[in-house]
Image: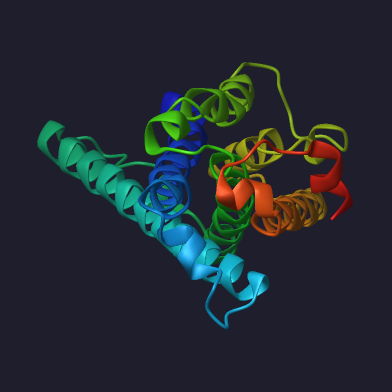
Amino acid sequence: NRMMVSFLPMMILLFIFIGCIYIAIDITAGEKERRTLQTLFTTPATTREIVAGKFLAVALVGIVSASMNILSLIVASQIQAYLLGEADVGMTLSLAPAAWGWMLLLVLLTTLFIGALALAVVLLANSYKEAQSYVSPLMMVVLIPSMMAAMPGVELTMQTALIPVFNVALAIVSIMKGTLDTGMLTIVAAASLVYGVLALYLASLTFGNENVITGEKINWKALFKS
């Protein structure tokens, strides 16, 4: 159970990332390669509406992917415990309703951040193949903090609660251990919301830049001034 508590946050975050990244690639770089993204910008829809629509698609797939994979892990652990005749069938099902609520909130906020960040980054690619080269660096943004959270002696503090992804991994570990510090979890949720909004703003900047959409050389100063 201790091992499960340590590595469950990494699995949850990885499932969210996998669910978000490939749909994000297909509806950005994939559409750019098929020349359908440029056509989309000739419609009456505003840039904000286009970003919102694509982000909701990415976020929905990310949430469903994480939920289904977590559910499959829980069911598999229950079946294994039943077959082995273990009395303790796992910690995940013994969580209080408040803990499940915090877990759901953190998953939603993490999906907001990862989904928006994935959209902003992979849109810079001009082809599906080029966008796939961005997967590994982006995955490190998820894997490294979640692996650090599994290290012994690492705790959720005021400082670690402000580090993106790392704070969510630590918060999930504390929830799984049954230590619900509402104050610290509120800080983690607030910080995650801020990072998610900033990532979504970055995505709106890239979608609003004509050079990015047409696949021309990107003027980075113009991108961040827009």
Q: Residue 159 occupies which quadrant of the picture? A: top right
Q: Is residue 83 left or right of residue 180?
A: left
At 82% from the left and 54% from the top, the residue drawn is 183
Q: Which residue is drawn at the image coordinates 48% and 23% (left, top)?
A: 136
Q: Nearer the viewer, residue 161 or 56?
A: 56
Residue 66 appears in view: yes
> As displayed, is residue 141 above or below residue 165?
above
| Residue located farthest toward the top when viewing the structure as drawn | 152
Asked whether, in this view, residue 187 is left or right of residue 95, the answer is right
Relative horizontal placement of residue 198, taking residue 21 as reference (left or right): right
In the displayed structure, 6 sits above or below 151; it is: below
Along the horizontal axis of the image, is 57 left or right of 197? left
Residue 64 drawn at (x, y percent) = 37, 59
Residue 70: where, in percent of width, then height? Answer: 35, 47
Q: Position of residue 29 (x, y in %)?
A: 46, 45
Give me the residue at 61% from left, 29% from top: 141
The percent position of residue 143, horizontal first and vertical second, equals: 54, 25
Q: How is the image coloured?
A: rainbow
Looking at the picture, tell me which residue is in the foreground, 149 or 42: 42
Image: 139 above or below 73: above
Which quadrant is home to the N terminus? top left
The answer, for residue 177, to whether it is visible in the render is no
- Residue 124, quarter of the rendered image: top right
Q: Residue furthest left?
A: 83
